Image (cartoon, rainbow, N blue to C red):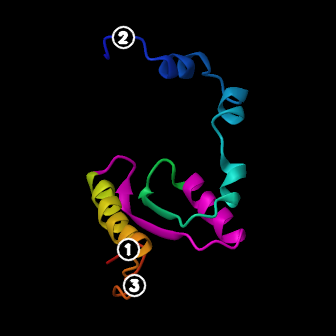
Amino acid sequence: MTGGRVDFWQAWLVHDKQGDPYWTRARDFSDDVAHVAAPVQIVTGWYDIFLPWTLQDHAALVAAGRSPQLYVGPFAHADVGLMAAGLREGIGWLREHLLGERGRPARPRCGCA
């Protein structure tokens, strides 16, 4: 499809067995999440195939004393609505953290509004 060899894709195909150390050794960063000190915003969907791990990352940050912002909406992983929510929420979050624009009206962070 790309007209050339894609090495990372070939590596994925070679490591196709459940429990293959390839996926935990060099691809699983869950143990490091609690060490992230930068502000974090997480935007995901209730139907996202990665939701369980996303919520685990959020829980790890909270347990480490961080205050991540979590937005969960009615979206699947590659849903256009999820991408739109990510942009909308991300721009507001960046304006607050990078430009210091505080005092935005409080909104629920559940994707319900």
- Name above or below for residue 11 compared with residue 52: above
Q: Secondary structure at mark 2?
A: loop
The residue mark sitting in front, 3 or 2, is 3
Tell me the CA gap for discs 1 and 3: 9 Å
- Name above or below for residue 14 compared with residue 102: above
- Of residue 72 and residue 102, the one placed in the foreground of this image is 102
Q: Residue at x 35, y 46 (%)?
A: 78
Q: Residue at x 44, y 72 (%)?
A: 97
Tell me the CA gap for discs 2 and 1: 43 Å
- Of residue 96 and residue 112, the one placed in the foreground of this image is 96
The residue where tag 1 is placed is 99
Q: Secondary structure at mark 3?
A: loop
Residue type at numbered disc 2: Gly
Residue 82 visible somewhere in the drawing: yes
Say whether residue 103 is left or right of residue 55: left
Q: Is the residue marked by circle 1 packed among few (<14), some (14-19), or many (20+) residues within 10 Å?
A: few
Residue type at numbered disc 3: Arg
Residue 102 is labelled as 3
In the rendered view of the protein, which quadrant contains the C terminus?
bottom left
Q: Secondary structure at mark 1?
A: helix
Disc on the earlier residue, 2 or 1: 2
